[in-house]
Amino acid sequence: MNLIGEKISYKPDEQFHLNDVSFNFKKGNLYTILGRTLSGKTTLLKTIAGLLNPDQGSISFEEKDFIKIPVWERNVAMVYQQFINYPHLNVYENITFPLEQRKLSPEQIKKRCR
């Protein structure tokens, strides 16, 4: 079960935000995306999450076209370094919010968050 991106490009204006990016994320591994400011890290994560559609390239998961899967069915979450999404919530609440939206039990939420 790999999440595979191939030759992903995103150019909403005169400059590429992503240019021919490929990756192969394998289940059970932890990955870190590093880069300087404005290098495309957030754009890549938004593309994987389904918040942006790439101009070119593909993303597949379990041999399915991940780009065609609706955002709410992707089981992908993003936590920003700064609290730009939910500044009124603490760290625990920011992490558990999407789990609560999925109506998981309090026990499941606590276990997953910890």
Image (spheres, rainbow, N blue to C red):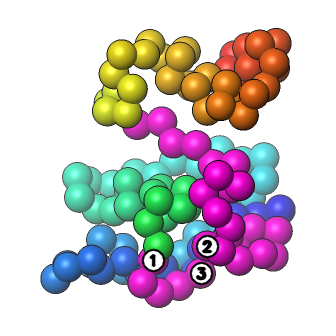
Kind of residue indicated by mark 2: Ile
The answer to which quarter of the image holds residue 88 is top left
* 95 in relation to 75, above or below: above
* 86 in relation to 1, above or below: above
For marks 1 and 2, give the CA distance.
9 Å
Callout 2 touching callout 3 (CB < 8 Å): yes
Q: Residue at x 74, y 20 (%)?
A: 109
Q: Which residues are magenta?
A: 54-80
The answer to which quarter of the image holds residue 26 is bottom right
In the rendered image, the residue lying farthest to the left is: 14
Kind of residue indicated by mark 1: Pro
The answer to which quarter of the image holds residue 40 is bottom left
Using the image, tell me which numbered label, if any, was put on residue 32: none
Q: Which residue is mark 3?
A: 58
Closer to the N terminus: mark 2 or mark 3?
A: 3
Q: Residue at x 38, y 61 (%)?
A: 43
Q: Which residue is mark 2?
A: 67
Q: Which residue is mark 1?
A: 54
Q: Depth-wise, is mark 2 or mark 3 nearer the camera?
A: 2
Depth order, front residue of 62/36: 62
| Helix, strand or loop for disc 2 | helix
Residue 111 seen by the camera: no
Give coordinates of residue 94: x percent, y percent.
Answer: 50, 23
Give coordinates of residue 60: x percent, y percent.
Answer: 70, 73
Residue 81 lies in magenta, yes or no?
Answer: no
Give coordinates of residue 105: x percent, y percent.
Answer: 81, 18
Closer to the N terminus: mark 1 or mark 2?
A: 1
| Helix, strand or loop for disc 3 | strand
* 9 in relation to 33, above or below: below
